[in-house]
Amino acid sequence: MAVKAIKAALKRGHRVTTNTTLFDDANPERVRKFFDEMMGLGVEGMMISPGYSYQKAPDQQHFLKRSRTTELFAKILGNRKRGWQFNQSPLFLEFLMGKREYQCTPWGNPTYNVFGWQRPCYLLQEGYASSFRELMEQTNWDSYGTGRNEKCADCMVHCGYEASAVEDTFGSFSGFAKTVKITLLPNAR
Ligand code: SF4
């Protein structure tokens, strides 16, 4: 059904991207074939993220732990094809493969819904702020992220860590240089 919908959207001239969450039973070869298939269909870009066991999720047993996440993503993204287009920064993909260390930037992708601005991110639910200013100024951001909060222990999700990778890309010469290198030569070390 999804493939039919993608084809129909592309036929009508829409831009189509995908967003894929992977769990601990993901098969790296099948995921790589999926990337090939999406690119073959004409999808513009792909987004991937490990499933994270946020407390409210009903199925806790299939979420990924950090070591398993990096092992899985190293298999999926290692020796990757040049034609695969990701809607994510190259350094975030490196982070998923365990090649870079980042701390979370929970305010990097704020969540707004009918209840207001969700603290601190869309995975955790620790109250709501009634305005963006209140969210930014009255949230104790330093108490979130791996090593700072047990609820964040295994999280490597893009809502918190993509922003950290972007900050690294444009905030340091080494990060920018690495991004250029990976963009030109995805499999160079
Ligand atoms: S590490 Fe960041 S993105 Fe992940 S649950 Fe914690 S605050 Fe949210």
Image (cartoon, rainbow, N blue to C red):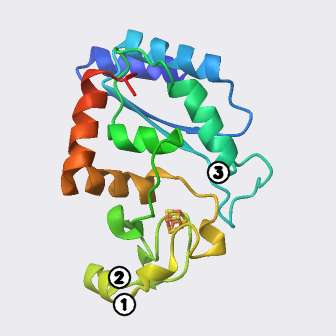
Q: Is residue 110 left or right of residue 126?
A: left
Residue situated in front as seen by the camera: 8 or 187: 187
Q: Earlier in the sequence, mark 3 or mark 2?
A: 3
Q: Position of residue 37 (x, y in %)?
A: 48, 12
**Residue count near mark 2 (Cα–Cα under 10 Å), binned few <14, some 14–19, many ≥20:** many
Label count reads 3
Q: Write down the quadrant of residue 90 in the picture.
A: top left
18 vs 86, nearest the viewer: 86
Which residue appears at 22% of the width and 54% of the height?
Answer: 172
Q: CA distance from mark 1 to mark 2?
A: 6 Å
Residue at the disc numbered 1:
138
User: Which label belongs to residue 66?
Assistant: 3
Measuring 33% from the left and 36% from the top, which residue is drawn there? Answer: 87
* Three-letter residue code for mark 3: Arg
- In the image, residue 58 above or below residue 48: below
Whether residue 24 sits left or right of residue 36 in the image: it is: right
